Image (cartoon, rainbow, N blue to C red):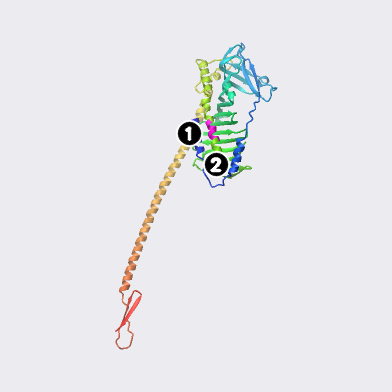
Amino acid sequence: MKFKYLQVFFITFFLSGCAANSAPKMSSEKGQKLVTEFQTENFDWTSPARVTSWLQPDNKEESCKIFIGTDASNKSERPFWEKEDISIFWDGECKDGYAYGIGREFMESVGSGLISSLASYDEPGIKPSLYYTAKYDDHQYSYFLETSKSESEGIVFSQEFVVFNNGTNNFSLGKSTSVFDKENNINYESHEYLFTGRTTYFINFSTNKSIKLEGSIYLADAIRWRTTLARGADPAVVVIKYKNDAVQMFEYEDQVRKATQLPENLTSFFQHEVTTGISNLQRVDTLLQPSKRAMSIYKRRVCQGEVSVDFMDDTLYGQICLPDGDLSRYSDQIAKYEKSWKESWARAEESQKKRARLAIQNRKIATRQAKKDAHAMAQSLSDFGKSVSQFNQNATTLHQSAVNQSVPTVNFGGNDVVTTNCVRISNVVNCRSR
């Protein structure tokens, strides 16, 4: 699943969420109070003391100083290169006693391990532009853009590929993107876990206030996305949308959760911030094009033939020239990791298909039973109708028979022959003597 598609996917489902429920609604005043609390939070952008120096690489006999910088709590603090035993290398050219042109700087120490940075020195003795950093021992490989122009604009962005390699069972891959927008006082981050269908976004208003959006298109996950408005690690509001499109909303007071409905001002705040954050993160691919062009230029220079240097292992140095770049050494683990997730997806898809087939089967059974019940009811009504018809017919025959029936002759009197005949018509009896 492509990163850009995931971003669009989560925007779509976030904006289609927030359905109503039967829980009590949070007041508009309370919602606005939360919005104001988070919008007025600020990062402390005060730059720490920046300590810089020009150091001579160990592999250069001629003067060829490279620029080194680090943040310190104060100017009097000794920088790491004065406190640690470090080795520094430069694989580029030299001019007027300084590094010149495009190349990689390598630095190795016990505290930091082996790190390389792709740098371009446009003028000797002038701070370079930086494009790429590889932290080999931490398995982190980052594209970023640090130039005089980017620093003046106050926007810092990067795209990092991270290998988590804590053992065979814990191997995983992650792609992280971040944007620090100092002008608007906000930080955006995204973390995509490759092959899993899961992505997490952060909209950080300060070091302690954030919106966290966790989304998934993995079939086995019940939750489509979860959005959390948080103070540090403590949630203030949580909105959950499930794969069946059901939505739950909760607010937290003193770490006690209760169901709620969000007012429109808080819902609009969520939607605006998430949409803006993801839009800014999507721009990073375009913003990093200068860094990727610099990498292409560098590779054309050093990867035309056999790659070899005298200051480090050729295999490690030359990994940047391979199709998979610095990840080539993990190709077997990546293949196993990808296979494992494909199998997991296949199982989830099969399980979904079984549920769908079962649902169809149950609907067919229910339809057949409904038809059977309807037929039985129709037959019962038909039989009942026949019974009523027969009853009416019998009643009519009985009535007709009663109408035509004579009352037996009764002799009222003595020996004189007097005959009294009585006839019943309906409920009236008429008698006549003769």
Q: Nearer the viewer, residue 18 or 86?
A: 18
Q: Nearer the viewer, residue 1 or 100?
A: 100
Give x and y (percent) for residue 342.
48, 32
Give x and y (percent) for residue 105.
59, 18
Real-space CA distance between mark 1 and mark 2, rounded to the nearest whole angstrom: 42 Å
The answer to whether marks 1 and 2 mark residues whose Cβ atoms lie closer than 8 Å is: no
User: Which disc is residue 22 wearing?
Assistant: none
Instruction: Determine crowd level at label 1: few under 14, some 14-19, many 20+ residues with C-alpha closer than 10 A.
Output: few
Whether residue 356 sits left or right of residue 21 in the image: it is left
Q: Which residues are magenta?
A: 273-279
Q: Amino acid at mark 2?
A: Glu
Quadrant in the picture for residue 108 = top right
Give x and y (percent) for residue 234.
62, 38
Report whether residue 9 is seen. Answer: yes
- Residue at image x 64%, y 16%? 54
Instruction: Determine crowd level at label 2: few under 14, some 14-19, many 20+ residues with C-alpha closer than 10 A.
Output: some
Q: Amino acid at mark 1?
A: Glu
Q: Compared to 40, does 112 lie above or below?
A: above
- Residue at image x 56%, y 31%? 189
User: Which disc is residue 343 wearing?
Assistant: 1
Q: Main secondary structure of the magenta part?
A: helix
Badge 2 marks a residue whose secondary structure is helix
Q: Nearer the viewer, residue 406 or 182?
A: 182
Q: Nearer the viewer, mark 1 or mark 2?
A: 2
Return the disc, 1 or 2, that comes first in the chain's sequence.
2
In the rendered structure, does residue 365 fall within the stretch colored magenta?
A: no
What residue would you read off at disc 2? 264
Q: Quadrant of the C terminus?
A: bottom left
Give x and y (percent) for residue 283.
52, 28
Badge 1 marks a residue whose secondary structure is helix
Q: How many marks?
A: 2
